């Protein structure tokens, strides 16, 4: 998949395109349905499917300090949409200047002049331009003027706790913040993942017999509620961000209250692994919350709990007991 940042970097030989526009944070099942429709339309028309997204999140520019938790890094987003068949991904820097573009200027400058759209697919609640003045209706009107078609796609819904909920990034963030990884995974179509780099921590886990990978993630990352989780650690190519090997892991999120810690960390104990992960680019996938974070009266009690966490992780992931 082609990938570039900024309109000026757009390849000159794309030809006319089928474009889908949005933040696509999480690339959840609703996003997957919309992107799948765009890819299908592009294949039928014999044109490339291009996904247009933004960085940073527009909320941070429109209302500074309100940046929502981010479900997928740009590298992870690119990996996921490429897997859905997208041919190209353009990342537009969302700046104060860009925010002030009128809907008409956005359509002409971005979609027509640079991306040469023949068809644009967006969610039915899509808005664009200064103060979100544009919507699917105005985009369709501009499409008739500039010679491209527009298709608004209905939002996806799912049954959760006996009620219908609209699958959205906001809903997934709420599930992650509550530690409800099962509901998050149902909406995402896969486990929620935190990407980062393995850094040196306090090395307490190694002294206790459970060496952990201390994963430092970028600011605003959607980290689950404090607790212990069953999941996986995925190694990633440092250049492309593409996933490589996947290992079962027991994961701790919190401040290490037994040791009066104050810094919130994500630490993964990789089961049956003997190697050095320091400096590795990794993803931590959260499958199921085993228990809340707790302060133990002493180190011996903590070690007993850690052993149980590892045993529970094996059970949740369907792995055989340790030899």
Image: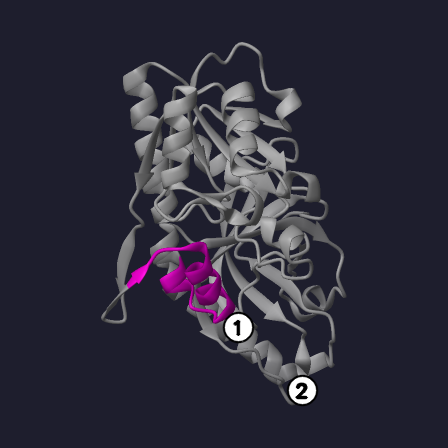
**Is 197 in front, or is 12?**
12
Label 1 element class: helix
Who comes first in sequence, dot 2 or dot 1?
2
Return the residue at label 2.
298
Task: Report the span colored magenta.
Answer: 165-184
| Circle number at residue 204 | none
Give the residue at the far top of this rendering. 13
Residue 267 screen position, x and y as percent: 62, 62
Residue in the picture at 62% in, 25% down: 7
Residue for point 35% across, 31% down: 150
Q: Judge by depth and name the residue closer to the eye, 168 or 294.
A: 168
Overall secondary structure of the magenta section: helix
The answer, for residue 196, to whether it is visible in the render is yes
Percent position of residue 152, x then y: 32, 39
Q: Is residue 139 magenta?
A: no
Instruction: Say if 134 sits above or below 229 in the image.
Output: above
Residue beneath disc 1: 307
Is residue 179 part of the magenta span, yes or no? yes
Compared with 144, 263 (above or below) is below
> 268 or 197, which is in the foreground?
197
């Amino acid at each position: 998949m082609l990938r570039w940042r900024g309109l000026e970097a757009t390849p000159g030989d794309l030809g006319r395109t089928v474009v889908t526009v949005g933040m696509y944070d999480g690339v959840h099942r609703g996003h997957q349905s919309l992107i799948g429709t765009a890819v299908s339309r592009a294949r039928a028309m014999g044109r490339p499917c291009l996904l247009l997204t933004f960085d940073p999140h527009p909320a941070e520019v429109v209302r500074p300090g309100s940046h929502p938790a981010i479900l997928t890094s740009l590298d992870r987003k690119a990996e996921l949409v490429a897997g859905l068949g997208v041919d190209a991904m353009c990342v537009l820097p969302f700046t104060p200047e860009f925010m002030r573009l009128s809907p008409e200027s956005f359509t002409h400058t971005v979609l027509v002049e640079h991306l040469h759209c023949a068809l644009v697919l967006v969610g039915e609640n899509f808005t664009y331009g200064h103060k979100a003045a544009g919507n699917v209706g105005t985009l369709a009107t501009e499409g008739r003027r500039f010679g491209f078609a527009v298709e608004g796609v209905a939002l996806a819904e799912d049954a959760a706790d006996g009620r219908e909920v609209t699958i959205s990034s906001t809903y997934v963030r709420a599930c992650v913040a509550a530690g409800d990884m099962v509901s998050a995974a149902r909406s995402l179509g896969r486990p929620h993942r935190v990407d980062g780099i393995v850094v040196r921590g306090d090395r307490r886990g190694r002294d206790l017999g459970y060496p952990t990978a201390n994963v430092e993630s970028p600011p605003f990352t959607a980290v689950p509620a404090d607790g212990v989780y069953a999941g996986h650690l995925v190694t990633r190519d440092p250049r492309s961000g593409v996933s490589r090997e996947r290992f079962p892991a027991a994961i701790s999120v919190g401040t290490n209250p037994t040791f009066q810690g104050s810094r919130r960390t994500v630490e993964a104990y990789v089961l049956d692994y003997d190697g050095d992960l320091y400096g590795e680019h990794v993803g931590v996938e959260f499958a199921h919350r085993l228990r809340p974070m707790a302060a133990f009266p002493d180190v011996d009690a903590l070690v007993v709990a850690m052993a149980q966490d590892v045993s529970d992780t094996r059970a949740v992931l369907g792995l055989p007991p340790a030899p």
